Image (spheres, helix red, strand yellow):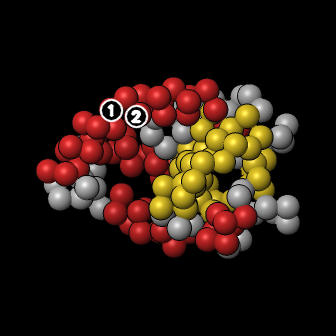
Amino acid sequence: MFIGEYQHTIDPKRRVAIPVKFRETLKRKAIITKGLDSCLFVYPVPIWQKIAEKLSQLPLGEKKMRQFVRLMLAGATETEIDKQGRILIPNYLSDFANLNKKEVVLIGLYDHFEVWNQTFWEKSKIQAEKEKDLVAEELGKMGIF
C-alpha cells in the first residue's frame, strides 16, 4: 500500500529515489506513465496489468476514449529499481510532468503513487484543501465518509 508524502530530488540523470516503504510493494520493477494534473503515475506491475486490460477494453470507436488510451498506454514504460532504490524517469515523462527542477514530491495513493513537480503539487494541494469540505459532503451522500 502506498500512503504518505515524500520530498525527494531528481538527479541530473533523471533518477528518483523511491521511499523504502514503496520499494517493498514494488519489488524490483514498476510501470511509470503519464498521469492526470501534470504528474506521473507509478504502479506495481500486477496493478498496472489490470488497469491496462481495462483500458484496452474501452470503446475505441469514441475519439476521446482512443486518445485517453493512447495517453496512458503509449505513455507508459517499465522501469527497474536499481540497487540504490531509484527509478529512471525517461525524458518524455520528465518533460510531461515538468520535472525540470531538482525537487519532486512522491505521494502515495493506495495502489499507486504519483511523482510531482514540487511547485505544481503545492498548488494542487492548496486547491484540494480549499474544496475538502465540499468533497467530504459529497462522499457522505455516497456513504463513503
Point 30% across, 61% down: residue: 57
User: What numbered label is drawn on residue 131?
Assistant: 1
- Residue 69, position as x, y percentages in the image: 39, 49
Point 73% across, 34% down: residue: 103
User: What numbered label is drawn on residue 36?
Assistant: none
**Quarter containing the C terminus:** bottom left
Mark 2 is on which residue type?
Answer: Ala
Would you say residue 130 is visible in this rendering? Answer: yes
The one of 65 and 32 positioned closer to us in this rendering: 32
Q: In this rendering, would 61 be left or right of 53?
A: left
Q: In this rendering, would 137 be left or right of 74?
A: left
- Residue 82, position as x, y percentages in the image: 81, 63
| Cβ atoms under marks 1 and 2 closer than 8 Å | yes
Residue 39 against residue 25 in the figure, above or below: above
Residue 132 against residue 58 in the figure, above or below: above
Callout 1 crowding tier (Cα within 10 Å): few <14, some 14–19, many ≥20? few
Point 21% across, 43% down: residue: 137
The one of 76 and 4 positioned closer to us in this rendering: 4
- Residue 138, position as x, y percentages in the image: 19, 44
Quickly name the residue at label 2.
128
- Residue 94, position as x, y percentages in the image: 66, 37
